[in-house]
Image (cartoon, grey):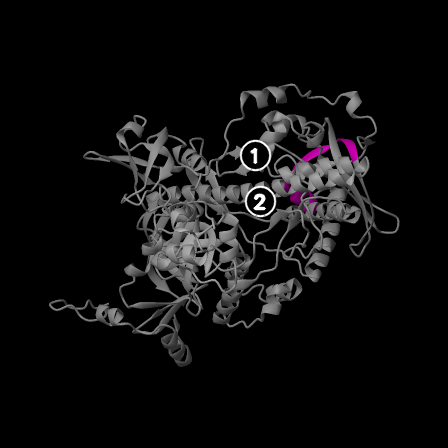
């Protein structure tokens, strides 16, 4: 018998199968002696292809059996890492010795070894399935004959060896881009090739440019894409106006940030005789200028979203479209897709119309201007009257959404002020005005109506979904809340209305912000999908993204689908093809969104660290925002800058990490430092290259651990011999008095 790949997989897939050596496997499958060599080669090939996995003692089995999972590595500065598995299961902890030459971002196969109470499951990496395609950015160094790159990303803690012929002429100290990273079994360190030299660390904008290259963000548009954009007329041709709803005479205006240059949404409102509202949400019709399959369309699909870094915007579409042709600038005709809704006084939509339209914006307002006009604007100004109507409507819509269980996390964000050279001069907290809420509620309503419209037609579409919190994150959240004195059940958290009621009950409490933050962290990530499962955070059964086609590709696609379906529902085979295509777009857009959000956060961290570099030795007030075994994360009150108090620097006691309750407990004093505690810290170090800030603890709101808590933590963290040895006095040394 000469077994095939399929016959081997079928045999190993049986419930009674137990991992075997190749010789035993061959004997069981009755492989002839003269065919054994070919059989052995086949098994090795299947391992290389990821179909089989080599286990301990040279035994072989299927990847999905025996506690094996696959996922992506998330490295840690300490050398260990976590693997995010391809399911709702908790991340698997990987000790440094079990990383098996895997790097941050690699896709790997993990053998799950087990788990301890209150901790993530632990595993070991058995195979690197795919190396990360993301380039590595770092500083080039020479030491003797050795050439290597020290990565900027602390999650990659290995130096990357560079062969002399692959150094691209880089000089020591220069920032470089490394690609083609590999790590063979006979190498102590991974190796790679320098693909680009960025410059010296002090060069202007190099820190952000390095970030852009690290996340492989697209910068400039290609010449063919720009040439295609140049062919689009800036004025609206007459033939594009035909059959559109003409709203140019209506009082329509935009409300955007003061720094915005692309305006993709406008609003209008009327109060009807029966006190209902006629709300118009008018969105730039990008699809009218970007046909499917065009160069611009393919580039937009690849980019997925505009990326808003701290000092620049990397747009999804060329500036000619975003800032001029499609932007709803005041005083010019613009093509739009309008959603005109009649909303009753109780917030219910009694009717709606979705039409291609043309508008002529009457006014451009900033959020600050709109806020001022609402408060102090003249009563005889029609725009002021409209703004106040919009405010009344938005408050009613918000109240209704909160009653249904939707969330309104009002968490300020850091705003970094830069000078003309890109140097941070100030950091302040964002202010959420009534005008922000006004626009948000209008857009939420339009997105919801469009989603319902598509769902009722039972046609393929892309939805914005948000699953309920589940699994490990939910368990950890409930345990952590106990430490704050709040007892919630899983049903209280998974039911949005009950969770909203809890959040409302703690408004004004000192720990309100940190609890809001913890709940946000415990939630799953919203994403794009063809299958609609609802949006947990908004408490909407059906939701999509329609209102930002200039900066999000799914919105552009929704516009295109509305046009297609308005002309008539396609045949079944066409619908099936469209659905397959939408699955791909949803996956790409979700992935690009995740990358852009991470890059945006990292760009802020870079500038926060740069802002703090000349403040070493100064003292700041903050709040404990996170606790790990390595130390305590502190968020500064005035700037929301994050930094770490290393536990090694807390020399007054030996601190035990209580993972369940996210706190450190002094072994001698039984003093507790946990989430939400107010602290005073001194800045020890700020490194923009590593995006790392270290503090020293000066004082804190310590809490004395109760006797019951002491007994509990002793059960969960038994002392080891090593621990006892560490606590012994070293002969010849005196203990410092503090």
- SS under mark 1: helix
Query: Label 2 to label 1, Cα distance in Å?
Result: 12 Å
Pointer 1 residue: 302
Image quadrant where residue 672 sits: bottom left
Of residue 331 and residue 176, the one placed in the foreground of this image is: 176
Q: Is residue 410 left or right of residue 358?
A: left
**Where is mark 2, residue-wise?**
590
x, y percentage for residue 569? 80, 39
Is 523 situated left or right of 709 in this image?
A: right
* 474 in the magenta segment: no
Q: Are marks 2 and 1 in contact (CB under 8 Å)?
A: no
Residue interval drawn in magenta: 356-375
**What residue is shown at x 53% (from left), y 23% (from top)?**
222
Front residue of this view, candidates 274 and 239: 239
What is the secondary structure assignment of the residue under circle 2? helix
Instruction: Judge whether residue 603 can be spotted in this image.
Output: yes
Q: Residue furthest left?
A: 732
Query: In the rendering, at what x and y percent does residue 563 appear?
Result: 76, 35
Q: Is residue 641 something one can see in this rendering?
A: no
Residue toward you, 720 or 628: 720
In the displayed structure, 336 sits above or below 515; it is above
**At which x and y percent is residue 20?**
40, 59
Quadrant, the C terminus: bottom left
Rendering coords of residue 49 (x, y %): 45, 45
Residue at image coords 54%, 20%: 223
Residue found farthest to the right: 273
User: Where 396 sits versus 254, above or below?
Assistant: below
Sequence-first tag of 2 and 1: 1
Q: In which quadrant of the rendered view does residue 97 lie?
A: bottom left
Q: Is residue 370 magenta?
A: yes
The residue sitting at 26% across, 29% down in the picture is 164
């Amino acid at each position: 018998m000469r077994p095939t790949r399929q016959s081997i997989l079928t045999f190993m897939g049986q419930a009674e199968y137990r991992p075997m050596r190749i010789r035993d496997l061959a004997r069981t499958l009755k492989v002839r002696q003269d065919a054994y060599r070919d059989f052995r080669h086949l098994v090795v090939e299947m391992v290389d292809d990821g179909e089989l996995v080599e286990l301990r003692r040279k035994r072989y089995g299927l990847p999905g059996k025996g506690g094996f999972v696959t996922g992506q590595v998330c490295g840690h500065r300490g050398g260990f890492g976590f693997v995010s598995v391809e399911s709702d299961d908790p991340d698997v902890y990987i000790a440094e010795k079990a990383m098996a030459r895997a790097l941050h971002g690699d896709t790997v196969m993990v053998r799950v070894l087990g788990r301890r109470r209150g901790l993530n499951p632990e595993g070991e990496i058995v195979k690197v399935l795919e190396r990360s395609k993301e380039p590595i950015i770092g500083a080039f160094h020479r030491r003797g004959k050795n050439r290597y790159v020290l990565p900027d990303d602390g999650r990659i803690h290995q130096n990357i060896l560079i062969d002399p012929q692959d150094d691209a002429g880089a000089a020591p100290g220069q920032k470089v881009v490394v690609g083609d990273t590999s790590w063979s079994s006979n190498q102590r360190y991974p190796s790679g090739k320098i693909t680009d030299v960025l410059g010296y660390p002090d060069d202007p904008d190099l820190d952000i440019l390095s970030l852009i290259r690290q996340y492989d963000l697209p910068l400039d548009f290609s010449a063919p894409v720009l040439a295609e954009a140049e062919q689009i007329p800036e004025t609206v041709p007459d033939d594009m106006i035909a059959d559109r709803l003409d709203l140019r005479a209506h009082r329509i205006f935009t409300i955007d940030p003061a720094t915005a240059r692309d305006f993709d949404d406008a609003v209008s409102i009327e109060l009807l005789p029966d006190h209902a509202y006629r709300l118009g949400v008018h969105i730039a019709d990008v699809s009218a200028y970007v046909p499917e399959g065009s160069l611009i369309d393919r580039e937009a699909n690849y980019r997925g979203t505009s990326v808003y870094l701290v000092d620049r915007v990397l747009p999804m579409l060329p500036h000619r479209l975003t800032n001029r042709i499609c932007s709803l600038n005041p005083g010019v005709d613009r093509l739009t897709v309008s959603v005109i809704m009649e909303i009753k006084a109780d917030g219910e939509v009694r009717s709606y119309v979705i039409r291609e339209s043309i508008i002529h914006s009457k006014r451009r307002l900033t959020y600050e201007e709109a806020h001022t006009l609402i408060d102090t604007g003249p009563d005889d100004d029609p725009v002021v009257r409209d703004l106040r109507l919009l405010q009344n409507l938005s408050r009613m819509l918000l109240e209704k959404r909160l009653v249904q269980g939707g969330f309104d996390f009002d968490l300020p964000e850091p705003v970094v002020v830069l000078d003309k050279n890109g140097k941070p001069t100030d950091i302040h907290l964002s202010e959420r005005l009534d005008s922000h809420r006004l626009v948000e509620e209008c857009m939420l309503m339009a997105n919801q109506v469009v989603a319902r419209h598509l769902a009722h037609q039972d046609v393929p579409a892309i939805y914005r979904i948000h699953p309920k919190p589940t699994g490990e994150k939910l368990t950890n959240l409930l345990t952590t809340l106990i430490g704050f004195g709040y007892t919630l059940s899983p049903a209280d958290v998974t039911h949005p209305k009950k969770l909203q009621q809890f959040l409302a009950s703690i408004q004004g409490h000192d720990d309100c912000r940190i609890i809001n933050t913890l709940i946000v962290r415990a939630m799953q990530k919203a994403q794009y999908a063809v299958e609609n499962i609802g949006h947990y955070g908004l408490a909407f059964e059906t939701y999509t993204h329609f209102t930002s086609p200039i900066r999000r590709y799914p919105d552009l696609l929704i516009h295109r689908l509305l046009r297609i379906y308005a002309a008539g529902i396609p045949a079944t085979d066409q619908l099936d093809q469209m659905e397959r295509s939408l699955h791909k777009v949803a996956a790409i857009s979700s992935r690009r969104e995740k990358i852009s959000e991470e890059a945006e956060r990292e760009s802020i961290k870079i500038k926060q660290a740069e802002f703090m570099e000349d403040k070493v030795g100064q003292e700041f007030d903050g709040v404990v925002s996170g606790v790990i075994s390595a130390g305590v994360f502190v968020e500064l009150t005035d700037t929301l800058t994050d930094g770490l108090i290393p536990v090694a620097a807390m020399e007054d006691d030996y601190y035990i990490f209580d993972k369940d309750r996210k706190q450190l407990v002094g072994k001698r004093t039984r003093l507790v430092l946990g989430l939400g505690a107010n602290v005073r810290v001194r800045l020890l170090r700020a490194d923009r290259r590593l995006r790392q800030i270290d503090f020293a603890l000066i004082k804190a709101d310590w809490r004395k651990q109760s006797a019951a808590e002491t007994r509990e933590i002793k059960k969960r963290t038994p002392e080891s011999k090593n621990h006892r040895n560490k606590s012994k006095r070293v002969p010849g040394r005196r203990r410092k008095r503090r």
